[in-house]
Image: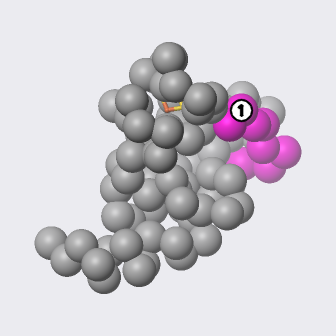
């Protein structure tokens, strides 16, 4: 497995997160349960970003795995999408 994260998608995914629930965000990009970890990072230097939200909210979660704001989309997918038109 490459030590660069795999681009799981070129658009963020809107997810309804529930207050008090623990989530494990996939940082390697190999999970088939995007945007969440399914354990496929094992054997790599990646580990999931585990977090709990205080308030229930809809969040645009990162799939390109380039966001500098953790699991939340920061727009980093935009230049990738422009470089990889579909
Ligand atoms: S499967 Fe990607 S971090 Fe766990």
| Residue 8 falls left or right of residue 48 | left
Position of the N terminus by quadrant: top left
Q: Is residue 7 magenta?
A: no
Reply above or below: 85 against 46.
Answer: below
Residue 64 or 53: which is nearer the viewer? Answer: 64
Q: Please say if 72 is above or below 53.
A: below
Q: Residues within 10 Å of mark 1 (few under 14, many from 20)?
A: few
Residue located farthest toward the left when viewing the structure as drawn:
86
Can the viewer see residue 24 in this picture? no
Q: Nearer the viewer, residue 19 or 68?
A: 68
- Residue that appears at 35% across and 64% down: 10
Quadrant occupied by the C terminus: bottom left
Q: Nearer the viewer, residue 1 or 79?
A: 1
User: From which residue to which does the magenta span run?
Assistant: 49-56
Residue positioned 75% across, 37% down in the render? 51
The x and y percentages for residue 41 are: 49, 25
The residue that disc 1 covers is 50
Indicate the secondary structure of the residue bearing disc 1. strand
Picture quadrant where residue 85 is located = bottom left
């Amino acid at each position: 497995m490459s030590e660069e994260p795999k681009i799981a998608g070129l658009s963020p995914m809107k997810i309804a997160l529930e207050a008090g629930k623990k989530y494990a965000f996939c940082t390697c990009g190999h999970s088939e349960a995007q945007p969440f970890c399914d354990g496929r990072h094992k054997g790599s230097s990646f580990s999931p970003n585990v977090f709990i939200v205080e308030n229930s909210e809809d969040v645009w979660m990162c799939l390109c795995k380039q966001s500098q704001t953790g699991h939340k989309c920061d727009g980093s997918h935009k230049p990738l999408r422009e470089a990889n038109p579909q």
